Image (spheres, grey):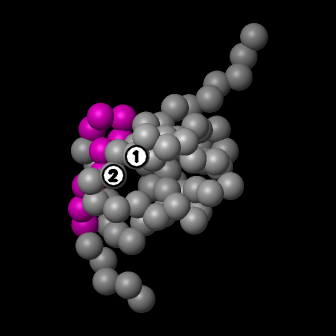
Amino acid sequence: MFPVNKEVVIANGREVAIEFPCSLEQFLVLQKLPVRSVVVEHNSEAVAPSEFAKRMLSPGDRLEIVTVVAGG
């Protein structure tokens, strides 16, 4: 088991303290965001949903998260 370390990432302009190690998918679940209905930019790079579980976050990372809403 990895040691737990609580640090901050910036999500949509606000600081969020999380425990590391943490994947992008884990972060979205912890924030109660719909993993299948969001678009994420990690440190100015778009991330494919298929990469969410593999993409590991680091302290100080910047995330822009947009929830996709379908409608007509």
Tell me the crowding category of disc 2: few under 14, some 14 to 19, or many 20 or more residues within 10 angstroms, Cα based. some
Mark carried by residue 43: 1
Q: Do the residues labelled 2 and 1 touch (CB within 8 Å)?
A: yes
| Chain-order first, disc 2 or disc 1 | 1
Q: Residue at x 58, y 37 (%)?
A: 39
Q: Name the residue under label 2.
A: 61
Q: Residue furthest front?
A: 45
Q: Which amino acid does label 1 sit on?
A: Asn
The picture quadrant where one finds residue 58 is: bottom left
On-image quarter of the N terminus: bottom left
Q: Is mark 1 on a helix, strand or loop?
A: loop
Q: Which residue is drawn at 26% across and 73% down?
A: 5
Q: Nearer the viewer, residue 57 or 5?
A: 57
Is 7 covered by the magenta stretch?
yes
Q: Give the range drawn in magenta.
A: 6-14
Q: Which amino acid does label 2 sit on?
A: Asp
Q: Which residue is drawn at 75% across and 10% down?
A: 72
Q: In this view, does 12 lie above or below 43?
A: above
Q: Residue at x 68, y 55 (%)?
A: 50
Is 46 covered by the magenta stretch?
no
Q: In this view, does 32 lie above or below 70?
A: below
The picture quadrant where one finds residue 27 is: bottom left
